[in-house]
Every structure is written in structure tokens, then in C-alpha cells.
Amino acid sequence: MRWLQQSLHRRILVALAFVVLFAMVTLACVAYMTQREALEKQFSAQLNAAADSKRAQISAWVAERESDVMFLSGNHFTRQHLATFLRAEAAAEEKVNAAEVLHESLASLQRSRVDYNRIVIASPTGEILISPTEQLVGQRIGNRATLEGTLAAGQAAVPDIYIQRIEYNEKLDLYEMCFGRVIRAPDDSPEAGAILGVLLVAADMSQSVYHFLEDWPMGETGTAVLALAESDGTRILNQVRFDSAKPLERFIPLEEPAIAKPAQLAARGDEGTTLAIDHLGASVITVYRFIPEMQWGLVLKMDTSEIFAPLRALLNQVLLIAIGVLFVTTLLAFPIARTLVNPIRELVNATRAVGNGNLAISVPVERRDEIGLLARSFRDMVHNVERHHQQLMAVNQMASDILGARPCDEALYDLVQAACQLTEAEGAAVILDDYDCQNGLQWLSAATASTERSGSVARVDGGTALFTMRSGNAQSVDLPALLFTKPMDSPEMLTTPIWGQDRQLGSLLLYKRPAPQEGQSLDRTIDAASPASSCGSPLSSSLSLSDKETLAALANYAAVVIENARLVMQLQQWNNQLEQRVAERTHELNAVNAQLTQLDEMKTEFIYNVSHELRNPITNLKLQSDLLRSNIDSPRRERYVTAIAKQVDIMAQLIGDMLDLLQLEKMSAQVTLSMVDLNGIARDVALKYSEHLHERPVRLGLDLADHPLIVAG
């Protein structure tokens, strides 16, 4: 992000783009959520209407089938003809007529309902007695559960119609639902109330309920689910769209509550609308209802991908609008950014110029907004900096002159003169606390150059100090109220403390003569404790913050001058003491050195004398040992004499070395180095000692280098 941090122009463009994008995203989110909620309400209302319609349609269909079965099995006409058909003593013609009448009644009912695929009257034992399909007459009821259920319902305390759940008929390859009711003997017959047989009606689901479930505006993903609650789960009774499972094959366990939850709720009597995941794993909006007549759950659902499909078009439109708005905003952002960035760039360039020392720079920005205010403030700042810089240069120049190698009184005199010139005050003074280690206070005054002598040095013992003014008149000041207090700003007097390293050294005072009133003399006493109303215009009103900072800087210079004077005085004292101590130590060292030199000469003379005295006896001992060796008559004496001769030679060598050492010490101050060839020295030594070595069992060899070996020695 460095490229963004280095340019305000880029920041403005990015900020505007971000604002536009944020606004468009917010608008898109609001439009998306609003449209989504509207679509959800719209499709939920459609699904609710369709679900209520389908539930009413299924309930009406069930009631209609129950009514058909109830009417056909319970009317006196059917009961009378069935009793005649089953009576053993009835004539054959009567039985045939009764069978034809019952056959026509069943056929008429079957023709009136397209979903009735079988209508039969069977005996309680399961033999088919009457059927519009002649092939079925005389056969046994294949579905014993339907027969037994119908007989059980007829034998109940309150006889009712038996309705069998949807089942698959393998022979006919269809899903059907059976309705059954017992047919009793007429009340006027001897067998009144006895069960003569059962009426069984089988309805094809594909021509009835399944058709109802598919007959509604489902769109591309809508589907209906018919569910039946079982002990350990929920079974789907119909063929669900996009599901490969056949009716009655799909079973949803209760252990999976997150899958097809609306179907399980509807099958157990709940109703509502929700956004859920169906048993196929798709996100759907579902409306579920309970059909109490059959204890079925009805679920109508539609995929959210289809319901919220218009949202994609909406998002595409918003995206196109956002791109257009962003493009227009970018075009407009460039001139807007220039109006902000260009003046700031000019201010930046001016700031750099000021930083490089160019205080004469001008900022040509004339605006009335915040940038114009910033430009004017910058010009004022540059003007103040330039003024302060000039004052600082003047102060530094004066300080350089003041802090030169001059007496302290002259430096302080120049300092108060500078204070008057830089602050345009009438008078200035430095009041010190006995800086020269004398009692009392010392005062130094300075005024402008209009007087013959603008300052003087006077001794003050604690009373008042006298100012020499521009007009030549004198002004007295009460010192105890001004000295060694906090910085004070009175109407006519301004004091600034002069601080050393560990204490206050004094004060720097400025005085501005008040404007004389009519009939008032210029000579009067200044009382620091007097109220401001009794004096003229206050000095602080004529001094700026920069002037006060200049005065503080001069006070610091005064402290430096005083401290330098004190340090110079101490340094001079230390130098005098050090010179005295060095002279004493030098005298002592010279005396000790003379003694050591005398002792060294005595030591050298003693060693030299002893060496000479020992050399003569050693020489005699050597001669005597040589004589003894020439007249030896036994090997034992020869060994002794040889040992004595070796020791005499060693002593002679030691004495010779000692004399050589003394000679070298005397010559050490005169030793000079020169270039020497080692080959020549080796050749001279071999030539010198070759004659002496012939008398001894020693062999001398000389091996010289092929080139000169030059060393400094």
C-alpha cells in the first residue's frame, strides 16, 4: 500500500471510489434483501394457497369415496338384492335378477369414477360374488388384509368404513387404495343385521391423489410430497419430482431431523411455512399441511434457486449501475482532487523551500476555504520564522561577540546592550549575587546608543539600583522585590532569572519608560509592588513571544558568561597550584636522579676496578696450569689440571664479558647503525680463530651464501 500512502491524489480517488462502492454495495444489499423478502412472501403465499387447495381436494376425494361406499353398501336396495342372491330357497330367476341389478349398480358406480379400477362384493370368506369384471367372479380376494380389516370395522361397536393405506398392486402394476364396508341383511328379513358380505372399492392413485399432487403450477423445481408417519420415521407415499425412488420406497428416519423436517412435521400433525433442506439435499421453501382424514402430511416445496432467480438479474443490474457510477465518479474525482491537491503541493514545495533555508518563499494561494486559511497561516508562520531567525542570528552574533575571550564585566555590558536593541526596551540590567565572591550585589546597566555612555558598572549593597535612561535621566528600582524570585512581568519591569548549574546566579531586567502623563515628571521611583493602574503601558504589551524567548536566550548566555568566568578563575587557580606542585616534584626528581647517577658511576667504577684486579691473577693461574699440563706424569693429575684450566678459562671469559659490557654502556649513547655484510664478518671470524683451533680437537667449517647478506647493525 506504499503507492497509496505516497499520493494524496490517489487517496482522494480511492476514497471517492470506496464511498461509491460502499453506497452501491449498501444499495445492492438493501435491494437484494427487500427483493428476497418479497419473493419469499410471494412464493410462500402461492405455495400456501396451493397446499390448502390440494388438502381440500384430497379431503373431498376421500369423503366422496367414503360416501360412495357408504351409499352403495348401506342402501336398502343393495342389501335386499344381495340377501335375495344369497338366499338358498330363492328361485334361480330371482337370484339372476338380483345379480344383474347388483352388477349394474357396481358398473354404474365404476363408470362414474375414473379412478375406480375394481369394485366387488365378496362373501365374508373372501369369495367374489358380484363384480363388473366377469373374470373376477368366483375368485378369492387376493388382499386378505383388506377383507379382514373391513370385517373388523363392521363388527365394531360403531361400524365404520375401512380405508386401507396406499399399496402397490404387482398384478396390475399400479398403486391403489382400497375402501371397504360390510353389507348387512335388511331389517325386515329373518337375518336382520347379519353380515351378508363386504363391498370393496379399489382406487387408482395415478388417476386420483397422485394426479392432484401434480396438477398445480410447480414451475421448474416445484413438487408435492405426501408423507405418512410411522413409528421410527416417515414414509413418502408418492413419486417425488427429481427423486429416483418409487412411491412407498423412500423412508426418512427420525434420527435425521435436519433432512426433510417439514415432511416429518406434517405427517405428525404440524402445519407451517419454512426454509429448509429436503430429503434430496436441496434448499427449498416449503409449505406443509396435515390431512386428518387420512393422517397424511402434505408438503409443497420449491427450490430457492428458482424462487430467487430474479435476484441474479437484480444483482447484474446493480453491478452495471455501480460500474457506470464508478466511472462517472472517477471522471469527476480528477478535477475535484486537483482543486485539493495542487494547493497542498504548492504548500509542500514552499515547506521544503523553508526547510532548505529559503524564508522569502511566497504561497500564491488565494482561497476562502480551509486550504486558504492554511495558506495564510503558513505565510504568517514563515514571516514569524523569518523574524525569529533574524533575531536568532542577531542574538548568536552578539552572543559570539559577548562570549569571546574578554573580561566578564565587558561581556555582560555588551549583553544588556543587546537586550535593549533586540527588545526595544528603555533600559536593561544584569543583577548578580556576588559572583566575584564579594559581599552585596553587583549591577550592570545599559541603554540605547543615544547617550554618550550607554552603561556603567556600580556596586549596590542591597538597596536600589540606578538605571541610565535614553534621555540621560536616572531611574531607581527597588531590588529586594525583584531579585531571586520567579519570572516577573510588571507593567514597567520584566525580570528573567539567570540560572547556573545548581543555583540562581541573578536576574536579567528590562525596563520600558511609561508614557508621561500631562504635568508628570519623567523622574519617579518604580515600585515593583505598585498596581498596574499607576504605571504606564506595560512592557509585556510591547513584547512578543519571540522577544521574550530572545530575552530568555540572553539570560542563558549571561549564565554561560558567568559560569565561564567562574570556571576560568577556578582553572587559573588550579593551573597555579599545578605549576607549583610540578615545580616541587621536578626539584625532588632532579635530586633523586643526581643521587642515582652518582651511585651508577660508583657501581661502574667498582666493577671496572674489580675486573682489572681479577684479570691478572686469572692470567697467572692460566700460565701455571699450562706449565703443569706440560709436566704431568700421571693421568689422574692430568684430569685435575685439565678441570682447573677449564674453570680458569670460564672465569677469564666472564671477566672479559663484564669489561665488554661496561665498554658498551659507555658507548651506548654513541651507537649508530650501518649496513653490514654477514658473509664478510663470518669470513673474518673464521680466519681469526683458525690458527688457534689447530691445537684443539675442534673442526671449523665455513659455508657462505651465494649472495650478500646485508643487515643494519
Image (cartoon, rainbow, N blue to C red):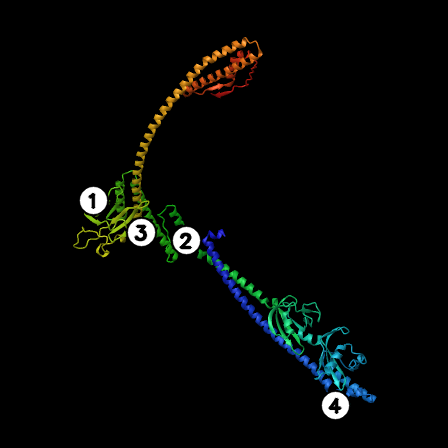
Kindly identify which residue carries mark 4: 187
Kindly identify which residue carries mark 3: 545
Q: Is residue 286 above or below residue 367?
A: below
Kindly identify which residue carries mark 2: 344
Q: Is residue 460 above or below residue 35?
A: above
Measure the alpha-carbon separation of dots 3 and 4. Answer: 129 Å
Q: Quadrant of residue 99?
A: bottom right
Crowd around label 3: few <14 · some 14–19 · many ≥20 (10 Å): few
Mark closest to the chain's N terminus, 3 or 4? 4
Kindly identify which residue carries mark 1: 451
Measure the alpha-carbon separation of dots 2 and 1. Answer: 52 Å
Find residue 568 and report its horizontal and vertical position in percent.
30, 38
Mark closest to the chain's N terminus, 4 or 1? 4
The amino acid type, in three-letter code, at marker 4 is Asp
Could you say whether the residue bearing mark 2 is in a helix, strand or loop?
A: helix
Mark closest to the chain's N terminus, 2 or 1? 2
The amino acid type, in three-letter code, at marker 3 is Leu
Find residue 550 and report its horizontal and vertical position in percent.
30, 48
Q: Nearer the viewer, mark 3 or mark 4?
A: 4
